[in-house]
């Protein structure tokens, strides 16, 4: 099977689904259907979402699996959030999570004290 195309190859507008058919009995429905927000994501964004879910939303595990830095993982997450039509909010819990990540990296000796200080100051 091939993934469902979501974009017109000519004008690049969103494609509209107008017919659904049951594989088993052949029953068909006709109308105007949407695929939902996840269908709006690029293949790379969908891959990121799959990894993020498999890692139970734990950014450190996503970092390890994808071999990316914390800021890159965070940036990709925000890109997906925006692509789904939501606003990216930076609340206190998010700030605390990023600080915790920096301190964990320092404890694992992945970064120096100077790098940790620099990252923490950027977050402030």
Image (cartoon, rainbow, N blue to C red):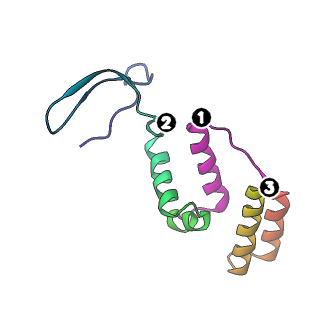
Q: What residue sits right under mark 3 in the picture?
A: 92
The secondary structure type at the circle numbered 3 is helix
User: Which residue is at 67% across, 57% downward?
Assistant: 71
- Region of the chain picked out in magenta, as a range: 67-91
Residue 50 placed where, x, y %? 46, 54
User: Of callouts 1 and 2, which one flags the residue occurring earlier in the amino acid sequence?
Assistant: 2
Q: What residue sits right under mark 1 in the picture?
A: 85
User: Which residue is at 67% across, 76% downward?
Assistant: 110
Residue 102 placed where, x, y %? 74, 69
Residue 114 appears in which quarter of the rendering? bottom right
User: Which residue is at 79% across, 70% downward?
Assistant: 116
Residue 4 appears in which quarter of the rendering? top left
User: Of callouts 3 and 2, which one flags the residue occurring earlier in the amino acid sequence?
Assistant: 2
Task: Give yes or no for contact between labels 3 and 1 (Cβ–Cβ under 8 Å).
Answer: no
Residue 62, compared with residue 44, is above or below; it is: below
Tell me if residue 66 is in the magenta stretch: no
Task: Give yes or no for contact between labels 1 and 2 (Cβ–Cβ under 8 Å).
Answer: yes
Viewer-side residue, 11 vs 15: 15
Viewer-side residue, 55 vs 119: 55
Residue 22, compared with residue 56, is above or below; it is: above
- Classify 10 Å Cα crowding around label 2: few (below 14), some (14-19), many (20 and above): few
Q: Cα distance, mark 1 to mark 2?
A: 8 Å
The secondary structure type at the circle numbered 1 is loop
Q: What residue sits right under mark 2 in the picture?
A: 37
Tell me if residue 90 is in the magenta stretch: yes
User: Of callouts 3 and 1, which one flags the residue occurring earlier in the amino acid sequence?
Assistant: 1
């Amino acid at each position: 099977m091939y993934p469902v195309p979501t974009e017109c190859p000519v004008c690049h507008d969103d494609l509209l689904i107008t017919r659904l058919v049951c594989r088993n009995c052949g029953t068909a429905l006709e109308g105007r259907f949407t695929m939902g927000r996840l269908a709006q994501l690029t293949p790379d964004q969908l891959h990121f979402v799959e990894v993020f879910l498999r890692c139970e939303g734990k950014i450190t595990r996503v970092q390890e699996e994808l071999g990316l830095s914390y800021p890159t993982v965070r940036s990709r997450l925000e890109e997906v959030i925006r692509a789904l039509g939501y606003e990216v909010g930076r609340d206190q819990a998010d700030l605390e999570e990023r600080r915790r990540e920096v301190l964990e990296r320092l404890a694992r000796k992945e970064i120096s004290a100077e790098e940790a200080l620099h990252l923490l100051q950027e977050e402030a």
